[in-house]
Image (cartoon, rainbow, N blue to C red):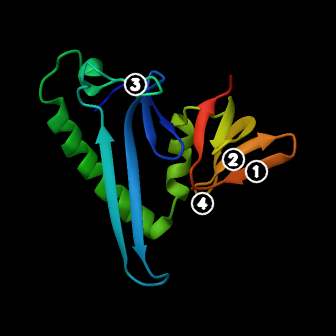
């Protein structure tokens, strides 16, 4: 769609000019080595209400980015569906590897000081992108550590 300024925030957010635009949730079920069921949900801030109490981070919306363009939502659904289908096919045969360069190109925090919030625990370090398994790589005084799944919130370091 040619929207400039979009970045990815591990593990599942899309940002535009440092403000959250969308989130992606993936649920996978099945047995190892057998057929799997995949559910992908994409939530896009199309138009935000006037009362946005409770949102604890900067956000933006498609309407704000589009400057009043009409039909952008339909174009987004069409493009997203096409790209998602082709990406799933590629992932099935090659895994995450073909996507790593693109992720690193659009990684919102790569090379920056960040903090990971896990409950009441915080870990500070430099974001080094993701590895072939999708784990977040965080460089600390102890070296580069991998973080996967669970309840981990990534924020810019204070």
For label 3, the crowd category at 10 Å Cα-Cα, with few meaning under 14, some 14 to 19 and many 20 or more, is: some
Is there a contact, CB below 8 Å, between mark 3 and mark 2? no
* Rendered position, 122 above or below 95: above
Residue extending farthest to the left is: 70
Left or right: where does residue 101 sit relative to residue 144?
left
3 or 1: tag closer to the N-terminus: 3
Left or right: where does residue 80 sit relative to residue 14?
left
Is there a contact, CB below 8 Å, between mark 4 and mark 1? no
Residue drawn at (87%, 40%) of the image: 141
SS state under label 4? loop
Residue extending farthest to the right is: 142
Q: Which residue is mark 1?
A: 145
SS state under label 3? loop
CA gap, disc 2 and disc 1 = 6 Å
Can you tell which of label 4 and label 3 is closer to the viewer?
Answer: 3
For label 1, the crowd category at 10 Å Cα-Cα, with few meaning under 14, some 14 to 19 and many 20 or more, is: some
Q: Which residue is mark 3?
A: 59
SS state under label 2? strand
* Rendered position, 8 above or below 39: above
CA gap, disc 4 and disc 3 = 29 Å
2 or 1: tag closer to the N-terminus: 2
Mark number, residue 133: 4
Q: Which residue is mark 2?
A: 137
| Quarter of the image that includes the N terminus | top left
| Percent coordinates x, y for residue 73 in the rendering | 18, 34
């Amino acid at each position: 769609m040619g929207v400039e300024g979009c970045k990815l925030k591990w593990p599942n957010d899309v940002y535009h000019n440092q403000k959250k635009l969308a989130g992606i949730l993936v649920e996978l079920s099945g047995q190892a080595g057998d057929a799997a069921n995949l559910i992908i949900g994409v939530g896009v801030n199309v138009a935000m209400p006037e009362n946005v109490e409770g949102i604890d981070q900067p956000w933006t919306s498609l309407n704000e980015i589009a400057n009043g363009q009409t039909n952008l939502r339909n174009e987004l659904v069409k493009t997203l569906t096409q790209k998602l289908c082709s990406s799933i096919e590629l992932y099935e045969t090659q895994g995450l590897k073909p996507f790593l360069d693109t992720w690193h190109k659009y990684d919102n925090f790569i090379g920056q000081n960040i903090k990971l919030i896990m409950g009441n625990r915080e870990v500070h370090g430099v974001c080094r992108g993701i590895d072939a398994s999708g784990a977040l790589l965080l460089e600390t005084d102890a070296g580069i550590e991998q973080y996967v799944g669970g309840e981990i919130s990534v924020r810019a370091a204070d």
